[in-house]
Amino acid sequence: MVLSFGLLTALPSVHQVHVSCSSLPPEEQLVFNSVTNCLGPRKFLHSGKLYKAKSNKELYGFLFNDFLLLTQIIKPLGSSGTDKVFSPKSNLQYKMYKTPIFLNEVLVKLPTDPSGDEPIFHISHIDRVYTLRAESINERTAWVQKIKAASELYIETEKKKREKAYLVRSQRATGIGRLMVNIVEGIELKPCRSHGKSNPYCEVTMGSQCHITKTMQDTLNPKWNSNCQFFIKDLEQDVLCITVFERDQFSPDDFLGRTEIRVADIKKDQGSKGPVTKCLLLHEVPTGEIVVRLDLQFCDKKSLL
């Protein structure tokens, strides 16, 4: 797969610099000048030469607002230095050195003694640490500050999305009951990937309350067994909505269908029998069902008879 920067709005002088990303799976479409998974438009932040501290291997880094891409230059820069990288006439080719490093998963650190002569810094990513050397102390400062700022923004954006999940305290004070939900499984979901599978997850909502299940890998029949609860304010108006998405790394998640059920209908189905299990058809897609277990519990049952 060969990817092009195109004319990025954040840096108009980038002209068709090509990067070979053949090690990425074909279903992971990485278009640099596109929309990120959750940060809006992808923005170009910084670039420059970097070296692996131990081996002195020369790399070229491209920092975006959602990931850091480490590459190797196939065609050498020559005597004109980095000025040529963003030249309209540049024919430089790059190949991906490592899978893009997502900034919501990193911690960037200076060495124990940052006053040393070597402009070294460390990037911790999950279970791996990259020790890199910049071309100067000033360049190291730029890399560290920009990676740290972008990482903090990414993490904060995800945190805000999670925090909107449950408005439990305000709902509990005025609610008439609660709905206990178990997202059991998905059945024959729509395939999104080249090998006929998907990486699905569910977003379960009731008004402003929201719960997101974990993402299951490479399956059309995910077993989530994910529990959540929603506080009921209005028996006739409240609706439980379930939307299924395919998790994408480099772009907004793909839609795999949605379904909904009114709380009043759950009450009718449940009666005095206790929890009920339902198989709900997903709409707006050619295939897919969601199995849920529902248990409606009221604070004062007599007032709802």
Image (cartoon, rainbow, N blue to C red):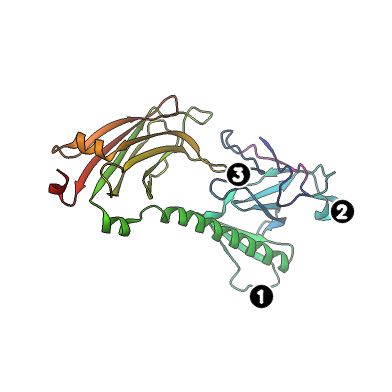
On the rendered image, what quadrant is the C terminus found in? top left
Instruction: Say whether residue 212 is left or right of residue 41.
Output: left
Q: Identify the residue at image location x=58%, y=72%.
A: 112
Residue position for label 1: 115
Q: Identify the residue at image location x=30%, y=55%.
A: 171
On the rendered image, what quadrant is the N terminus found in? top right
Residue position for label 2: 79
Q: Is residue 293 above or below residue 128?
A: above
Q: Is residue 17 visible?
A: yes
Instruction: Say whether residue 19 is left or right of residue 149.
Output: right
Q: Main secondary structure of the magenta part?
A: loop
Which marked residue is nearer to the observer: mark 1 or mark 3?
A: 3
The extreme top residue here reads 286
How far apart are the alpha carbons under marks 2 and 1?
A: 30 Å
Residue position for label 3: 35
Residues rendered magenta in the picture: 15-23
Asked whether 115 or 29 is in front, the reply is: 29
Q: Identify the residue at image location x=83%, y=45%.
A: 88
Give the percent coordinates (x, y) of residue 125. Answer: 54, 55
- What amino acid is found at the position of numbered circle 3 in the picture? Val
Circle 3 Cα neighbour tier, 10 Å, few/some/many (<14 / 14–19 / ≥20): some
